[in-house]
């Protein structure tokens, strides 16, 4: 509570006053930082050079412990461009056909899968089989069952599996957890968390509109952030779900997946989290009200920069490169051979997918779905 | 669009530059102001001297065209107190037993009913029968059918019937209508509007907790503002409704009426309005996102003062006494013998009640309710 200053933030994060002048390395923002041994870097191959790979390359450039060492792409022109730009040798460049040969390449430690959702499972299984650690983007898969299979395959192969939950590395979201789970304003009762982008100008061929590749509409791609925010603010798993499909206002685009969806998560504490995810308008906000105050972010769930406040004071946190911080934390754990923090693990992805499956079931049937 | 200044506001409201130094009379804020004849005042009797009567007395004191002339109360101590404080003669003071005698009292023009919801219908019918104009607080009644009966009784008696929709007189809400209905940022796609107060400390005997007197929980008393805001921002009537009862976290209080409820209104334009009304936490916010921008208020639906902005600029409207402005507009119309504006009419109350009935039906059945 009280006011927010950069010094406060630094102190909250557990850094001493001596560090208050220069910000500590981004990796230090990891809530459960692993000790680093030798200053080795983790060599990462990006699998799928689409929109998010272009966001990640900035994060990779800013990271301390990761290095863009390889690529996997089906498009020769992209391969040429990335190899040139990042000085990637031919031997570290794969197609989807040659991908499995990565098992024989000691110059790649980890495969970061940024393929369309529908390919996540296959490539996690193939990366694990190749003996590589894996980061897979959210949503982890289409079903909880598939998530279990992916987790087991990685365990069996002795590789670590992470899900690309970048928001756990943003100080605004670390603060949501502290305020909510720490009951700083008492028990949180109601959360409103919504994320949407108007996709009017998107190509009708975009994979986000195809059921087989996306698995669903905005719930899969954006709603997962709302589900996450509810879960980590409360530190609980929902016990029941209701949901509603919204109208189709862009019928030329939304033939296979939902355009709009709203849902409500009911938590054992009695807290409710209501959300909208939409592809027909822009919305990006988070609000939590507790017995003795509220806290909110707007923008809240996008790439930021975020703006937030509590009922007492405005947030004043530094802007961080979420992707760099996420990558550095994962690298630190993998290099130190320590298990990844729970918040970025495959188990975390599985828990979200369990909720997302229940949301779809509730929207389809109109029935409240109970989660055992 | 653009920036908001007090001068802008005054110009938007249609007042000349000459008025820009001193604010014009509050009654002038009525979107459809009736011409005033002689400077007569409307003599008002407050019926029910509870919490809201205590809010209204400030509005009455600030109004230009209304005068607190009488009271109706079942509590002798309250009668004595109000008579002394407002110089009300004995002949203008009624009990619920003597109320009908008001028909013979030319010193009372209008009865303002601030009784518990469950008594609204009876007292509107009795006031109309007594030949008095009526203002009834929201929610107007328990059912659309009762609203129709009340409207017809007033028409038959030749008296005007208003519902206490104070927010239509607040410049922030007049602006919501202009931005939404005027499509200033294009078509509105999604509205989030929620209002709640934590009632933990309330007496278990409070009428708000009794089904017979309240008709329902927070949907009746607070949700009506969210329904209103959705309807007047869009200028449309919803064509379908889904709704969900939330958990009971204060079982010692919520034995008869809902403690929490969420709902979604679907409008013919394709816009969706999602809302929560709750009695277990504080929430007071409005957000609308349209094709080319957003606009929001927080606080939004309470007595204010409100704070708002669009995606382009912060609102900068004067704080007004909503009740005084509402009373003056109603008085202006009644004194001029012109029909009340639609936004404050019994018809407006009926339209809200139609939606509220559908919300309860949807929450009870779990089914989407279509409004013909």
Image: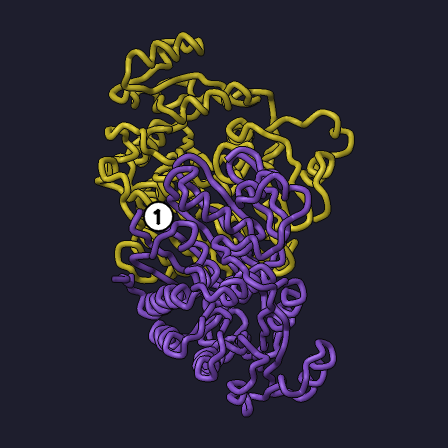
Chain colours: A yellow, B purple
Q: For the view shown, which residue lies furthest in the bottom direction?
A: B97
Quadrant position of the C terminus of chain A in the picture = bottom left
- Residue sitting at x 37%, y 44%: B189
Q: Which chain carries label 1?
A: B
- Residue sitting at x 54%, y 36%: A338
Residue B338 lies in quadrant: bottom left
Where is residue B96 shown, x and y percent of the image?
55, 88
- Camera-side residue of A216 and A124: A216
Q: For the view shown, which residue lies furthest in the right direction?
A: A18
Q: For the view shown, which residue lies furthest in the front direction?
A: B38
Where is residue A333 shown, x and y percent of the image?
54, 32
Residue A133 lies in quadrant: top left
User: Does residue B65 sit above or below A265 in this rendering?
Assistant: below
Does residue A200 appear left or right of residue B1 in this picture? left
Where is residue A327 shown, x and y percent of the image?
51, 28
Residue A337 shows in this picture? no
- Secondary structure under the numbered disc 1 in the rendered image: loop
- Residue sitting at x 45%, y 24%: A55
Q: How many marks?
A: 1
Residue B288 lies in quadrant: top left
Circle 1 packing at 10 Å, graded few (<14), some (14-19), many (20+), is many
Residue A202 shows in this picture? yes
Which residue carries the number 1 mark?
A: B271
- Camera-side residue of B105 and B364: B105
- Camera-side residue of B176 and B208: B176
Where is residue A364 shown, x and y percent of the image?
26, 54
User: Does residue B250 sit above or below A337 in this rendering?
Assistant: below
């Amino acid at each position: 509570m009280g006011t927010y200053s950069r010094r406060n933030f630094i102190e909250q994060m557990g850094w001493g006053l001596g560090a208050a002048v220069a910000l500590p390395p981004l990796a230090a923002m990891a809530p459960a930082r692993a000790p680093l041994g030798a200053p080795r870097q983790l060599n990462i191959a990006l699998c799928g050079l689409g929109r998010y790979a272009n966001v990640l390359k900035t994060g990779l450039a800013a990271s301390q412990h990761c290095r863009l060492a390889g690529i996997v792409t089906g498009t020769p022109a992209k391969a040429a461009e990335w190899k040139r730009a990042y000085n990637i040798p031919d031997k570290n460049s794969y197609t989807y056909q040659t991908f499995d040969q990565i098992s024989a390449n000691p110059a790649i430690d980890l495969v970061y899968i940024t393929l369309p959702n529908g390919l996540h499972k296959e490539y996690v299984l193939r990366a694990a089989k190749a003996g590589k650690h894996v980061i897979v983007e959210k949503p982890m898969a289409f079903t909880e069952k598939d998530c279990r299979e992916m987790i087991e395959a990685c365990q069996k192969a002795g590789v670590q599996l992470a899900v690309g939950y970048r928001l756990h590395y943003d100080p605004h979201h670390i603060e949501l957890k502290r305020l909510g789970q720490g009951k700083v304003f008492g028990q949180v009762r109601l959360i409103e968390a919504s994320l949407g982008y108007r996709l009017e100008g998107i190509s009708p061929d975009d994979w986000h509109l195809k059921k087989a590749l996306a698995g669903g509409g905005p719930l899969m791609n954006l709603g997962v952030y709302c589900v996450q925010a509810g879960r980590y603010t409360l530190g609980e798993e929902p016990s029941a779900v209701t949901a509603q499909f919204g109208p189709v206002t862009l019928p030329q685009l939304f033939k296979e997946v939902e355009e709009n969806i709203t849902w409500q998560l009911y938590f054992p504490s009695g807290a409710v989290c209501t959300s909208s995810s939409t592809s027909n308008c822009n919305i990006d906000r988070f609000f939590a009200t507790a017995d003795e105050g509220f806290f909110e972010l707007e923008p809240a769930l996008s790439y930021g920069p975020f703006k937030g406040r509590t009922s007492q004071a405005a947030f004043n946190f530094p802007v961080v490169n979420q992707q760099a911080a996420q990558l550095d934390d994962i690298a630190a754990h993998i290099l130190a051979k320590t298990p990844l923090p729970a918040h970025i693990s495959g188990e975390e992805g599985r828990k979200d997918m369990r909720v997302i499956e229940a949301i779809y079931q509730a929207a389809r049937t109109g029935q409240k779905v109970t989660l055992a």
